Amino acid sequence: MRPSWFLWSFAATIVLTTLLAMSQSSRLTRMNIPYLLGTMFTSNRERAKVYGFLVHLVNGFVFALIYVAAFRAWGGATIVRGIAIGSVHALFVLAVGLPMLPGLHPRMASETSGPSALRQLEPPGFFGVHYGWPTPVSVVVGHIVYGGILGAFIEI
């Protein structure tokens, strides 16, 4: 693992997280990924944001390693290749990851069983549209930028 991988995966994850936070604060989406991830571990709302941010940061490093493997298979990293992988990554998150979340999350209702005293979080639904129709757009843009940063700056 090269030092640039660590640096640029950290930078790309911070930019991705910032773009998603900006989407929420500008009311384009109600989805807050650090909060959703953090509430898997605690019911304390403030701690959940911190825990979720840390989990999202670790996820960013793990996924960066997958990007690096793809770049190596393709013979090098480029911004176009990063954007391509980021697009696929976003589609996976939207089509598989978010709909699967209620099955993993102890505090999230599901599409088939509504909220309860313990499961009060709304499920994101397919492509996250339960959190607003612009949600998929913000996820795709964020992941394209994430991939673009990795493709542009990681040295293979």
Image: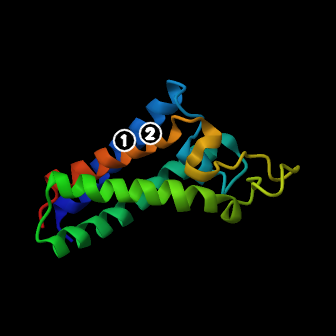
| Residue 143, horizontal then vertical, whole percent | 36, 49
The C terminus, quarter of image: bottom left
Instruction: Report the residue at 62% width, 39% height from top.
Output: 131
- Judge by depth and name the residue closer to the eye, 39 or 123: 123
Residue topped by disc 2: 137
- Which colour style is shown? rainbow
Residue 8 visible in image: no
Mark 2 secondary-structure assignment: helix
Residue topped by disc 1: 141
| Residue 70, horizontal then vertical, whole percent | 24, 70
Q: Residues within 10 Å of mark 1 (few under 14, many from 20)?
A: some
Which amino acid, by three-letter code, is at mark 1? Val
Gap between marks 1 and 2 measured at Cα:
6 Å
Mark 1 secondary-structure assignment: helix
- Judge by depth and name the residue closer to the eye, 116 or 34: 116
Q: Is residue 137 above or below residue 93?
A: above
